[in-house]
Image (spheres, rainbow, N blue to C red):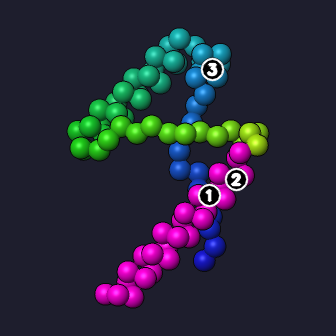
Amino acid sequence: MSFERENRYLVLKNKDIERYLTEEQHDALQRMRLQIEAGRIEDHREIRDFVVIESDWPEYERVWQMIEHRAKQLKETRRQDQDLE
């Protein structure tokens, strides 16, 4: 099975939020973010930080290659662990 890129996260650039949303929309978005964070805390899950690399950055494809390499290594490790069981 080959590596497939997944669209797992919703990323909104702060500059775009300020430019394209009304103040009411911005406030609603902030409330949703806070609600999600509160839910994660209630579920004893950490609040995460992320690194975002825009598709027009020169590092973009290289980072995808790094993630693919990591995913393949993890899959191989899991397979080896199953073989030991």
Between residue 27 and residue 79, name the one nearer to us: 79
Which residue in the protein does label 2 denote? 62
Q: Secondary structure at mark 3?
A: helix
From the image, give the main secondary structure of the stretch colored magenta: helix
Which amino acid lies under the numbered mark 1 shown in the image of this protein?
Answer: Met
Q: Is residue 78 magenta?
A: yes
Q: Where, quadrant-wise, is the N terminus in this rendering?
A: bottom right
Which residue in the protein does label 1 denote? 66
- For the residues bearing labels 2 and 1, Cβ distance under 8 angstroms: yes
Residue 32 sits in which quadrant?
top left
Which amino acid lies under the numbered mark 3 shown in the image of this protein?
Answer: Lys
Quick check: 15 above or below 83?
above
Which amino acid lies under the numbered mark 2 shown in the image of this protein?
Answer: Arg
Q: How many numbered marks are there? A: 3
Which residue is rendered at x = 65% and y = 16% of the image?
A: 19
Q: Where, quadrant-wise, is the C terminus in this rendering?
A: bottom left
Q: Secondary structure at mark 1?
A: helix
Disc 3 to disc 1, C-alpha distance: 28 Å
Task: Give the magenta range.
Answer: 59-85
Work out whether mark 3 precedes mark 1 in sequence or the reverse, and give the earlier one: 3
Q: Secondary structure at mark 2?
A: helix
Work out whether mark 2 precedes mark 3 in sequence or the reverse, and give the earlier one: 3
> Residue 22 vs residue 83: left or right?
right
> Residue 60 vs residue 68: left or right?
right
- For the residues bearing labels 2 and 3, Cβ distance under 8 angstroms: no
* Nearest to viewer (mark 2 / mark 3): 2
Which residue is rendered at x = 64% and y = 40% of the image?
A: 53
Which residue in the protein does label 3 denote? 15
Q: Residues within 10 Å of mark 2 (few under 14, many from 20)?
A: few
Q: Position of residue 54 (x, y in %)?
A: 68, 38
